[in-house]
DNA sequence: ATTTTTATGTCAGAAAACATAACATCTGTT
DNA sequence: AACAGATGTTATGTTTTCTGACATAAAAAT
């Protein structure tokens, strides 16, 4: 009878997002503070999250498990959101930074293998 | 990247459901009081609604617009949830009651024609 | 034509959920 | 050892939601 939720619609309070992601409120707010997500706000200033936000949070968890730090994850997202002019100028992100990022990632190559047991990516667990 | 939300999962606070359905909290609680919906509760007793609940509420709105009353809508839902043994015994719902229901509905046949402007059914508006 | 019932509005008081901010702690890096 | 990053914890204030009571307009019953 119904379809796909408009994934950007701010529907979920932080308590639900905590359950869905198994993150603490502290963590979620910290990631927002560092611009990894930007949940909407109610008139009364309460955060309201979209399904996209939840997806992003699950990704962040993954990246952190893989040894990346917040700065690294941030850079990855900044790159994504800037397909810009077909890979125009290298922008203001130095090669040094990118190399460091890559290095960081390689260092931790022996990854923990999904402690949750299963994680087929994103929100698939909650959908059908 | 993602799919269909597990429609029975209690995800939404009443404020969001109000927006989604354009019902007041009073109305939503009243319909619950009359067993048309049964939203989950948090530990702290706050209502949490599933997408199915939202669908149901939109249906209720429609039925009310069509002149049905709460009792009538309730009966319809009770019938639905009782496909039971392939239409076993007529149960405890008398023919008289059913005739009354039908009559009720016919009386109001000249329906208002969707004041909202558009309503293609269910949550489709919020999905893609 | 009254009286009753329905569906909803509104208000009050209490409790839950959430907000921000500060300080604490652990871990890995310099 | 000192520091920075990520998160835990606690305190305090605001928003949201709860239940319950009373009010009311429209519909139904008498």
Image (spheres, coloured by chain):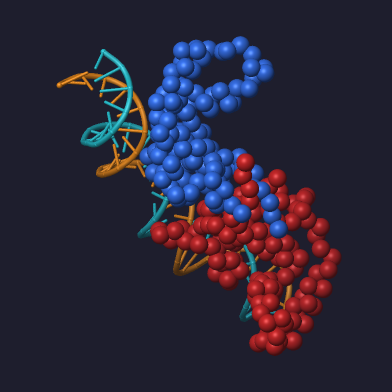
Chain colours: A red, B blue, C orange, D cyan
Work out which quarter of the rendered image holds the C terminus of chain A and state it.
top right
In the rendered image, residue D8, in percent from the top left (x then y), is placed at 59, 57
Work out which quarter of the rendered image holds the N terminus of chain A and state it.
top right
Question: Which residue is at the front of the view, A121 or B105?
Answer: B105
Q: Image quarter for residue A85?
A: bottom right
Q: Image quarter for residue A86?
A: bottom right
* Residue at x 83% of width, y 68% of height: A109
In the rendered image, residue B71, in percent from the top left (x then y), is placed at 43, 25
* Residue at x 69% of width, y 77% of height: A83
* Residue at x 61% of width, y 44% of height: A2
Question: Which residue is at the front of the view, A75 or B94?
Answer: B94
Res B110 visible: yes
Which residue of the protein is positioned furthest toward the right in this rendering?
A110
How many labels, in total? 0
Placement of A119 over or under A81, stated as above or below: above
Res B28 visible: no
Placement of A30 over or under C13, stated as above or below: below
In the rendered image, residue C18, in percent from the top left (x then y), is placed at 48, 55
* Residue at x 46% of width, y 13% of height: B96
In the rendered image, residue A98, in percent from the top left (x then y), is placed at 74, 81
Would you say B7 lies left or right of A44 here? right
Placement of C20 over or under D8, stated as above or below: below
Question: Which residue is at the front of the view, A58 or B1?
Answer: B1
Which residue of the protein is positioned furthest toward the front in this rendering?
B110
Placement of C5 over or under B115, stated as above or below: above
């Amino acid at each position: 009878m119904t379809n796909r939720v408009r994934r950007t619609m701010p529907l979920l309070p932080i308590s639900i997002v905590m359950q869905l992601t198994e993150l603490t409120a502290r963590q979620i707010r910290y990631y927002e503070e560092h611009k990894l997500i930007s949940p909407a706000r109610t008139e009364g200033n309460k955060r309201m999250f979209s399904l996209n936000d939840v997806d992003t949070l699950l990704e962040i968890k993954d990246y952190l498990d893989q040894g990346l730090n917040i700065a690294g994850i941030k850079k990855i997202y900044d790159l994504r959101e800037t397909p810009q002019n077909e890979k125009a100028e290298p922008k203001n992100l130095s090669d040094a930074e990118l190399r460091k990022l890559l290095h960081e990632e390689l260092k931790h190559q022996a990854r923990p293998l999904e402690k949750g047991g299963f994680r087929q990516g994103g929100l698939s667990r909650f959908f059908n």
